[in-house]
Image (cartoon, coloured by chain):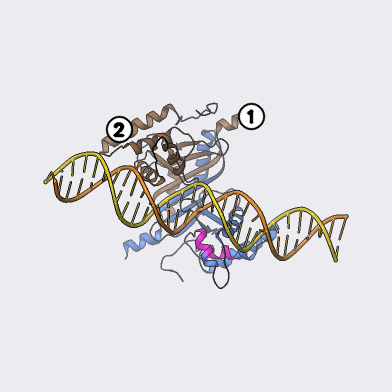
Chain colours: A brown, B blue, C yellow, D orange
Amino acid sequence: MHDHSAVHDHGACCGNATDALARAERLCAERDLQFTRLRRDVLEAVATESKPLGAYDIAERLSGQGRRVAAVSVYRALDFLTENGLVHRIASRNAFVSCGHQHGEGVGLVFLICRTCGSIDETTSPEVDDQLDKTLAKAGFKPSSRILEVEGECGACLGHERNP
Amino acid sequence: MHDHSAVHDHGACCGNATDALARAERLCAERDLQFTRLRRDVLEAVATESKPLGAYDIAERLSGQGRRVAAVSVYRALDFLTENGLVHRIASRNAFVSCGHQHGEGVGLVFLICRTCGSIDETTSPEVDDQLDKTLAKAGFKPSSRILEVEGECGACLGHERNP
DNA sequence: TCTGGTGCTGATACACTGTAACATCGCATC
DNA sequence: GATGCGATGTTACAGTGTATCAGCACCAGA
């Protein structure tokens, strides 16, 4: 399917797509939301790929064999999934990744985007959050959401460089 | 021109556009770069507005009276300006703001985007940078650039709320 | 002076991203 | 069956961004 020589430390790929789907199913049952086929398929498409996918990529993947999924529908499904924290939008790429963790509400996420292999890792840092909160308070700014995306090279690609 | 009842603490508007232009002129002279009319006009358009402007907005503003500026040209000018740190791209809005400070290279910026008035403030926080560096080092990730954008309510709009 | 190169701009075309509006369908409820 | 609601399908369109080629100014070197 895809290259596994690069080891991800969160493993949001392949087998873990089933985890994401299971989690989604549970969450929708809890909140009394509809986890429809389209939403399931969109989530699956995003979860089986460690790289961020564009809406039109997803639409293309879901289309074929007599089914045609328009980008609009994908956007609606993505809206639903992001609102419920199952998928994250990567603003710097206009693309989407499935959520690798289950984190509480209001946790600040940090996305690590590798320039070389294109994969995305997702972490959190309470220390960064704390400092950021202090900075915002000092500026008299009341935050409601934040975006923190770092571009660079992931550990796996750095390793490849050193040991080619 | 625009509403000044909301006080910005960095004041990247109106009169300060001339500052931005002067700074740009100096910087281009230092680095032996061409500060052409188009680049000047684009920077001026962005600097006279505290809200982020889209490329097509800028193109529209520069067009008229026999001049037609295509969006492509604006994008090229914006590329030049962002590469030289005179303008910043707001990823979450697909829009651009002029740089309010002169900061050294490699300083992590924090953009504060007000949901209510749409204005953007720009600050820095060495503490956040430090913590983020530690987090990235722990993850084995070598950063080359970062995006940190916070959406919420600015001090001015919070004040208006309390004293309407 | 001519000539070639370089960098900026103009212009067209096109691909990608995202939203608005309306029709339809399935489903639950009355 | 009628009604209402949410999800999807469909079309259209606006906004964002890139590729490509052509013209133009300007400078360096023959």
Q: In the picture provided, is B12 more to the left or to the right than B164?
A: right
Q: What stretch is highlighted in magenta?
A: B41-59
Provide residue B99's location: percent of width, then percent of height.
55, 58
Residue drawn where x is 60% and y is 58% of the image:
B77
Q: Mark 2 is on which residue type?
A: Arg
Vertical order, B29 against C27 (above or below): below
Q: Is mark 1 on a helix, strand or loop?
A: helix
State the image quarter where residue A15 is shown. top left
Q: Mark 1 lies on which chain?
A: A
Can the viewer see residue A139? no
Q: Mark 2 lies on which chain?
A: A
**Residue picked out by circle 1:** A162
Vertical order, A150 against A100 (above or below): below
Between label 1 and label 2, give the one nearer the viewer: 2
Q: How far apart are marks 1 and 2 (CA)?
A: 43 Å
Provide residue C23's location: percent of width, then percent of height.
29, 51
Q: Is mark 2 on a helix, strand or loop?
A: helix
**Residue picked out by circle 2:** A26
